[in-house]
Amino acid sequence: MADTVKTMKLHIHMDDSDISSVEYMTEQYRLACNFVSQYIFDHDFPMSSVTLSNRLYQTIRSEFGLKSQMAQSAIRTVTARYDGIRTQMREKPYKFKDIYTNKWHCIYRNLNWLQKPVLFSRPQADLVRNRDYSFVTDQKTNTTYLSLNTLDGRIKVTFDVPACFSDYFDGTWSFGTGKIVSLKDEWYFHIPVTRKNDIEFDKDQVKHVVGIDRGLRYLMTTYNEKDQTSFYSGEAVCRKKDTFNKVRAELQSKGTKSAKRALKRISGRENRWMSDVNHCLSKTLVDTYGSNTLFVMEDLTDVSFDENLRSRNSKQRNELRSWSFYQLEQFLTYKTEEVGSKVIQVSPEYTSQRCPKCGRIHKANRDHDSHLYTCDCCGYQANDDQVGAMNIQLLGTLWISGNENPKFRISEQGKAIRPTS
């Protein structure tokens, strides 16, 4: 049973003296991270925190003035970043097309593919609970302060209290290492909080099986066991993405320092907006179906190299690559685990080409321009996104029945063979 992990984001308020202390600490921490990153890059990527601590701890303490715990945290911050990059490289190998055989080849990458060390450009600092940060309450005023350790000593700051703040202190949540960051001259403290889930998903108790087809024209198309289909339009999202792309292109063409700063601001704004969209979509699904629901999605790990994607124009390819399909899956996963539901991934093979009524698989049955699927065997017609959701839902039903890896295969007659492991 997976744990529930959330991030509590606190908007903190400081006077000029406290801001000066925090700015100095986060800048020294950033420089220390870049020092560690350069060492890792130059020495064939040693990733053991113990090894790096033995080699770099004293230098970090003396050259950057970090305290003992902060020096250790800086090493862990850098190794965590490299671990993340290594995972991304492993999950997204380098793919190229042989011009002579017209076949695609795959090369799995490692950190040696990096051309330069990871750069930490944004002032930040990771602070350990009860060592570098804690919450203290003034009994006279009943005010809770955030106590932060800086290189100039500890400071106590106020913060905006989120609505769910008290819920995290009921004894069921554990606090992780917090991160202090700055955004638009405002300071924030992000704390990961973890709770063990008491509700476990049980196949035998499933009430709903929901197939989810993801795209851009419709961000989601869902189909359930009651033959109910829901469409979540992506028209407004595409318009806003076009606006971001136009502004980005104008700034990139200028190439000035102020334009580059503006590009960073826009990137952060777009990422926050995309996260909000994915949060709303995932919350809508969980609120609609509740507990004991199996949500079924296609495994889109290699969506950028899908045959269908390569056949699209450059604008459509950029939109598909930039949309955060994986983030939607992450948000839905942790939200469903809280209520005793589950998300699984299934093979995307033939889900958009298979007739959900007779099982005929024929690529030409799907008309991308009209978004209509018409079976040349039985005559069944439906929206192509709906057909995808219906086939995905069927694979989920087969998973419930005991098939751990259901997927469609095609026979010589163009009919779907019964999905097998």
Image (spheres, rainbow, N blue to C red):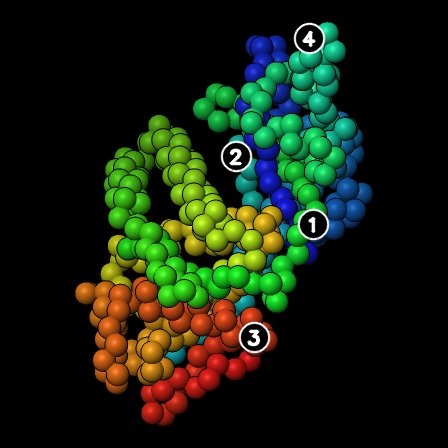
Q: Is residue 210 above or below residue 30?
A: below
Q: CA distance from mark 1 to mark 2?
A: 40 Å
Q: CA distance from mark 1 to mark 3?
A: 25 Å
Q: Amino acid at mark 1?
A: Asp
What label does residue 198 carry, if any?
1
The quadrant holding residue 315 is bottom left
Q: Position of residue 206 (x, y in %)?
A: 56, 63
Is 345 on the left-hand or right-hand side of 391? Answer: right
Which residue was labeled with disc 2?
121
**Helix, strand or loop at mark 2:** loop
Q: CA distance from mark 4 to mark 3?
A: 59 Å
Is 84 on the left-hand or right-hand side of 75? Answer: left
In which quadrant is the N terminus drawn? bottom right
**Helix, strand or loop at mark 3:** loop
Which residue was labeled with disc 3?
401
Which residue was labeled with disc 4?
141
Q: Nearer the viewer, mark 3 or mark 2?
A: 3
Q: Amino acid at mark 4?
A: Thr
Which numbered disc flags the more N-terminal residue, 3 or 2?
Answer: 2
The quadrant holding residue 74 is top right
Q: Amino acid at mark 2?
A: Ser
